[in-house]
Amino acid sequence: MKPIFMTYTKNDIINFCVLMVLGLVIIPAFIKTEYWYTSILIPWLCLALATIGQQIVMGYTGQLALGAAGFMAAGAFACFNLILRVPELGFFGSLIVSGLIAAAFGILFGLPSLKVRGIYLMVATLASQFFIVWMIDKFGWFKNYDSSGIITAQDIVILGVPFTTPLAMYLIIVFVVTILTLLAMNMARGSTGRNWMAVRDMDIAAESMGVSLLRTKVQAFAISAFYCGVAGALFAFTYLKSLEPVAFDIKLSFKILFMCILGGLGTINGAFIGAAFILLFPVLLNSVGNNVFHGAIDATIISSIEQVIFGLLMIVFMIYEPLGMAKLWETIKQKFKSKKSKK
Amino acid sequence: MAADRKFKIGKPILEVKNISLSFGGVKAITDTTFDVLEHEVRAIIGPNGAGKSSMLNCINGIYKPQKGTVYFKGKTLSKITPNIMAQMGLSRTFQNLALFKRMSVLDNILVGRKLHTKTNFLEVALQLPKVKKEEKINRDRSEEIIEFLEIEDIKNTPVGKLPYGLQKKVELGRALATDASVLLLDEPMAGMNIEEKRDMCRFILKVNDEIGTTMVLIEHDMGVVMDISDRVVVLDYGKVIGDGTPDEVRSNKKVIDAYLGVEH
């Protein structure tokens, strides 16, 4: 199928329009409860954005990195300090600059990828996770010398208009995530993405074709960290509404890693599917526990069951569908189509 | 054959001088010298373990020889990396296939166009007009190569799913896409049946004939080597034991001994 606009085919554009109508018209019109925005839609989109970052470095470039939450912390605290100290930048300006600051960390912590690979790289990238969080904790300046340890995030104000209701914040996130997703798709489908995948699939051949391993890997780490940084800032300002380094611990990094793998390595839509699954699954399990068993099962047991099922799913996916839910979805669609055409 | 060639065989374009390479105590190549002339088809032959692939890896910069120099296009190269060699116009294929397995045939060949892609990631992300223009040029050239190699019907298939013979073709296609002036082909016909081999020979000669690409190839099938190459260099135990036209090499006593074994 030929692309019509940018790198998008007719089907892509139809999908895009459907999603936009759904996200911007149907959801705001029909969902009135705050719970849906503050506990599901907002964190989902933020984490999906961070997962796109993880996809770029892990799914596309094949570098096993585990430090997404560290970059998110960098982005979140950068955004806090920028709004505090350089108010002229405005919210979106601060968001972009904090992404760039996270990208600088991404370059720094991506450098080990030139020497080590696989599980060893994963250990090396853990440094970003611990170093960034430690740095923020250690130096009071980052937290504006707040002694309580938890800082309240500033209200989002764009051109003098405050965006503080859940719906308004949701709309801001939809705007940012849409743009960044489209840019990520353009890169993934263009020459940039081909270089990433070439490095992933066979680095020595890629180098023989003139793809610079140094530039490609560092670029992937930088772009990945940019996405994580922006996601982290949004996550802190719209979901947590506070800033504390503890929120960006290694658990969050693992969560993003799982979203990436379960969603489907090397796919952009997999980031959204994976994030939705991992975020919604506990909610689903909880409501099943409450509504079916009427609280007969203890909440702690439910959360343990959740861990067990996650672990099982990871193993099952690794064995039977290493390309994750996005691929599963494709296969189902294909089967449906071929059945249709047979009739 | 030589008389009616569009691209006459010219001066040396690639020379290796006194190359020695060892892995720990194992000597892979010892003091090897030979040259490759512009526009010729040059074969490297030799028994298993003679150091042929190691030789290509030295030229291409994957291995760093302990001694010796590589001259390419009149320059002595002090630091060789695969990337530098690619930029200077030398491309290659690999013995054990080094394709991008999860990418389609077309995408594999498009990676070969990397050096003809000047736009950066920001321009690609924003899909500026010049990115589209460049992408179209690269795609057109890739389609041309796909048509030339007669693999149009599989161009959207992930390479990992293709049979071996076709993968070899794709790898040649990717090397061709670089528009390099010298191609190193490491056993381009290994594991192919007679028909596939004939096709491959046809492609190699056609490229050499029409674009004038210099070919350096390693091959085991003697019939093929004698048919398509202008000159042959024979390696055995990491040393050159014969160098010359196919006829000269065929009658060389040392070469016959190396291949048939000799009574001591």
Image (tube, rainbow, N blue to C red):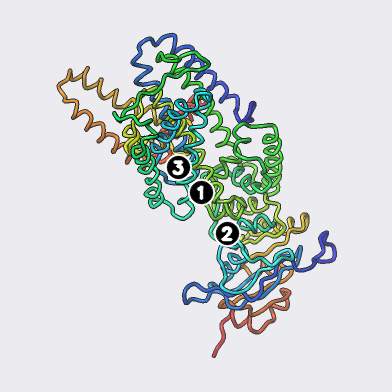
User: In the rendered view, does A317 fall on the left or right side of A86?
Assistant: left
Q: Mark 3: which secondary structure?
A: helix
Pointer 1 or 3: first along the chain:
3
Seen at 33% across and 16% down, the residue is A35
Q: Report the number of numbered marks.
A: 3
Please state if B155 lies on the left or on the right of A28 as rendered.
right
- Residue under label 2, please give it: B94
Q: Specify few, some or many for label 1: CA neighbours under 10 Å numbering under 14, 14-19, or 20 or more.
A: many
In percent of width and height, residue A263 lies at 41, 34
Q: Amino acid at mark 3?
A: Met
Residue ranking furthest to the bottom:
B264
Image quadrant where one finds the N terminus of chain B: bottom right
Q: Position of residue B46 (x, y in %)?
A: 60, 73
Q: Secondary structure at mark 2?
A: loop
Q: Name the residue at 45% across, 34% down.
A: A228
Amino acid type of the residue tagged 2 in the rendering: Phe
Q: To which residue does mark 1 refer?
A: A201
Q: Residue furthest left?
A: A296
